Each structure stands twice: as structure tokens, then as C-alpha cells.
Amino acid sequence: MTNKQIYLQDKYASRAQREGFKARSAYKLLELQEKFNLILPGQTVVDLGCAPGSWLQVSLQLVGSEGKVIGIDKTKINLTANNLVFYQLDLIKDSDKIISTLPPAHIILSDLAPSTSGIAVVDNAKSLKLAQTAWNIARKLLLPQGNFVCKVFSSKESDDFFKLLKPYFASLSKFKPKASRKSSKEYYIVGQNLKQRQKTTS
Ligand SMILES: C[S@@+](CC[C@H](N)C(=O)[O-])C[C@H]1O[C@@H](n2cnc3c(N)ncnc32)[C@H](O)[C@@H]1O
């Protein structure tokens, strides 16, 4: 890693500490919001893979007191707010329960990341499985005109996943925030304005 990269990482981490965010990832969602204007006051946001909670913090700020934020992770979080609900669940094992429990949402976010092995082909496959699971949940819960954000690791398979999503949204983009480490193969797929909500029976 170059000195410049270390400096940039520190910049986001220390800024997160200073500004009271649980993680430097907060700035990724803030960049996504600035670019795509995804989350509006009063809306319902579902955040899949939300721990430690910086995307929840940003979402709570954006939806305001009239909005609602729902977070899911297999790891507990240490964050509370009147309009925040957290479920400690496994997205893959509990996806049916999640679909039947959660309300329809205007925005579904997935910053889900697997524990990585360092073997690209294994890590890409695990990441893609999480992204596909997030989409299976999103296509059942997302309201018409809703927005979907999903982290993937760049690969031929993630390109295929991108193509699969294309018909569902009025606009589909790839975005790598500046706050995302240059060395990471992650980027975000951003689907805006869902054309039609899928039926809840699969
Ligand atoms: C990069 S972190 C998310 C950071 C979060 N966006 C934030 O800003 O604080 C990825 C999360 O995905 C969660 N995760 C990975 N696999 C999961 C699964 N099968 N079910 C639920 N959560 C999972 C991890 O526990 C981890 O908290």
C-alpha cells in the first residue's frame, strides 16, 4: 500500500471518528446519496448487512423523524433510535422470514460483505451469493419507483448480475465511491426507479 493510500484511509477513518459515525463506510453512502439522491425524508429504508451501523446513521439523518430505518445483520449493533428497528438474522438462512416480516420499502441497501479468504474466486462467489440474496429480498419488498443499492466485487459474474438487474429498473449504474479503498474490488450497483414490484409469492 502506498503512503498516499494509507493517508486516504486514515482520512476517512479519523473523519468518521470525529463526526460520530460507527465506520468509515458512512462516506460511501453519503457519496452515493450525493450522486444519485436515493433517500428522501419520510421514506422507509431497509439496510441489509448493517453492522456496525454507519449506513443506518446516515439513513436516519436522511429520512428524518417521519421516516423509518430497518437494519439486518448477523452481528449485533450498538445503535438505537425511535425510528430504527434492528433484526439479528442471517440473510441467507433467514431470507424467507425476512421477506415475510419486513414492510415494503422505498430503498433497499446492501453493503453485505463475506468474511474474505484472500482467494479471489472464492471471495467473489461468496460476495455474489450475498448480492443475489439481497436482490431476492429486494424484489419482494421494494416499492414501485424504489431504489436498490448493492455491493459486489468486480468479476465476470458480477457483470452478469448487473445485466440481470437491468430490465427491472428505469436506470442502473455502477459506482465506486472515493471512500472505497482503491485496492478493493468492490463497487456498488445502483438501481433507480423499480419498474414493477414482484409478487410476494415466489
Ligand atoms: C461491510 S459490513 C457493513 C458495514 C455497514 N454498511 C456500516 O456502514 O456500518 C458487512 C456486513 O455484512 C454482514 N453479513 C455478512 N454476511 C451476512 C449474512 N449472511 N447475514 C447477515 N449479515 C451478514 C457482516 O456481519 C457485516 O456486518
Image (spheres, helix red, strand yellow):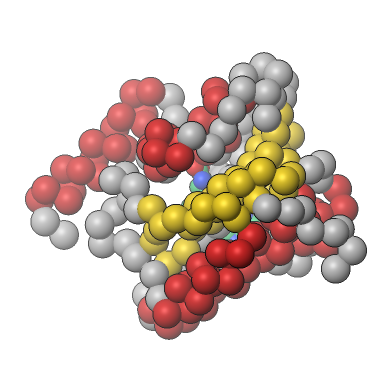
Image location of residue 25, percent across then percent down: 42, 43
Query: 13 above or below 188?
Result: above
Q: Which residue corresponds to the image point at 60% horizontal and 55% vertical from the top-left?
A: 169
Residue positioned most to the left: 3
Q: How many marks?
A: 0
Q: Quadrant of the N terminus?
A: bottom left
Q: Which residue corresponds to the image point at 45% horizontal and 73% vertical from the top-left?
A: 159
Q: Nearer the viewer, residue 85 or 78?
A: 85
Q: Is residue 107 visible?
A: yes
Q: Is residue 153 left or right of residue 69?
A: left
Residue positioned most to the top: 65
Q: Is residue 61 left or right of residue 1?
A: right
Q: Is residue 12 left or right of residue 70?
A: left
Q: Which residue corresponds to the image point at 26% horizontal and 62% vertical from the top-left?
A: 183
Q: Nearer the viewer, residue 87 or 60?
A: 60
Picture quadrant of residue 90:
bottom right
Q: Which residue corresponds to the image point at 44% horizontal and 30% vertical from the top-left?
A: 21
Image location of residue 96, percent across then percent down: 83, 62
Q: Quadrant of the C terminus?
A: bottom right
Query: 171 above or below 18?
Result: below
Q: Is residue 113 left or right of residue 105?
A: left
Image location of residue 116, percent across then percent down: 45, 69
Image location of residue 47, percent across then percent down: 62, 44
Query: 112 above or below 44?
Result: below
Query: 108 above or below 168?
Result: above
Q: Is residue 57 visible?
A: no
